[in-house]
Amino acid sequence: MSIDKDKFSKKFGQHLKDIREGRKIRTEKVSLRKLEQISEIDFSQIHRIEKGESSPSLLTLKALADALQISLKDLIDF
């Protein structure tokens, strides 16, 4: 099975952005700066993930899910 890594990363990034902006799962918006403060993940790293330019580690995914107050399953189920 072959995975198009760029397409996958961009799709996940858009999913994360949709969650953060309250379009999926959550109803409350969270700014990038606020997510940076809560998750302790650098703003630029979150931005690169949302643009599909970076693949987050499992620890980063867990920190983002916790900061967004959603389950890790909800974060990666897109």
Image (spheres, rainbow, N blue to C red):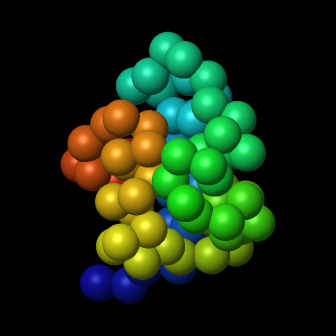
Q: Say which of 9 and 56 sits in front.
A: 56
Image height check: is 53 above or below 47?
A: below
Residue 17 on image: x %, y %:
62, 42
Identify the residue shown where x is 65% and y is 60%. 46
Image height check: is 46 above or below 17?
A: below
Residue 32 on image: x %, y %:
71, 44
Residue 58 on image: x %, y %:
34, 73
Q: Is residue 10 visible?
A: no
> Position of 8 compared to 17: left or right?
left
Identify the residue shown where x is 36% and y is 35%. 69
On-image quarter of the N terminus? bottom left
> Position of 21 compared to 62: left or right?
right
Q: Is residue 64 visible?
A: yes
User: Please, which residue is most extreme toward the bottom here?
Assistant: 2
Q: Say which of 76 and 40 sits in front.
A: 40
> Position of 47 compared to 5: left or right?
right
> Position of 72 compared to 7: left or right?
left
Identify the residue shown where x is 62% and y is 31%. 30
Identify the residue shown where x is 44% and y is 38%. 68
User: How many numbered badges does the structure rendering display?
Assistant: 0
Residue 71 on image: x %, y %:
25, 42
Image height check: is 75 above or below 70?
A: below
Image height check: is 60 above or below 74?
A: below
